[in-house]
Amino acid sequence: MLLAACVNDRAVAGHLDGPDTAAVSLSEVLTVLDRYPVSSLESSGAPAGSGGEECAELLQAFGTDEFNAVRAAVREALKGHLADGGPHIRITDRREALRGIML
């Protein structure tokens, strides 16, 4: 959910919707993750039953080891994709690799 909130932040900022969200740059998502994950979670707009509860849990956990562990896991996944594809890699460029992520 944290990754989704950060992607959503960049999609909204870029006026991207639906399938166009795949044009979001992974380096921009990493910046959101590092600099303002709380505001991305707060503005995610995820409704109950579709991530809203998870957003609320993450917001409650902000500043704890649990939150930091989630953020570190997301950061490592993003860094792996960036190392593989370069600094301008977008979601659409990593579609097949992103489908293979198992948590």
Image (cartoon, rainbow, N blue to C red):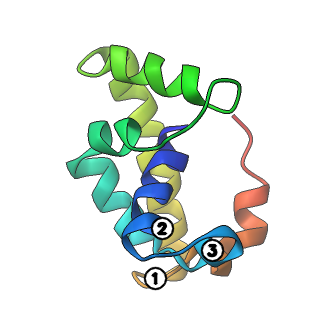
Sequence-wise, which precedes: disc 2 or disc 1?
Answer: 2
Q: Earlier in the sequence, mark 1 or mark 3?
A: 3
Give the residue type at disc 1.
Gly
For disc 3, the marked residue is 22
- Name the element at disc 1: loop
- Quarter that holds the C terminus: top right
**Up-down: is 88 above or below 21?**
below
Which of the two marks, 1 or 3, is nearer to us in this view?
A: 3
Label annotation for residue 11:
2
Instruction: Name the quarter where the N terminus is drawn.
Output: top right
Gap in Å between the C-alphas at discs 2 and 1? 20 Å
Measured as percent of width and height from the top left, residue 81 is found at 54, 67
**Amino acid at dot 2:** Ala
Secondary structure beneath dot 3 equals helix
Q: Amino acid at mark 3?
A: Ala
- Would you say the residues marked 3 and 2 are in contact, meaning their CB atoms lie under 8 Å apart? no
Whichever of callouts 3 and 2 sits on the residue coming sooner in the sequence is 2
Between marks 3 and 2 in the image, the one whose residue lies nearer the viewer: 2
- Residue that carries the numbered disc 1 in the rendered image: 86
Depth check: 22 or 75 in front?
Answer: 22
- Name the residue rendered at 39%, 81% in the picture: 87
Image quadrant assignment for residue 100:
bottom right
Q: Which label lies toward us, 2 or 1?
A: 2
Measured as percent of width and height from the top left, residue 90 is found at 54, 78
On the rendered structure, is 53 left or right of 57? right
Q: Residue at x 21, y 50 (%)?
A: 35
Nearest the eye: 83 or 30: 30
Circle 2: is it few (<14), some (14-19), or many (20+) Cα within 10 Å? Answer: many
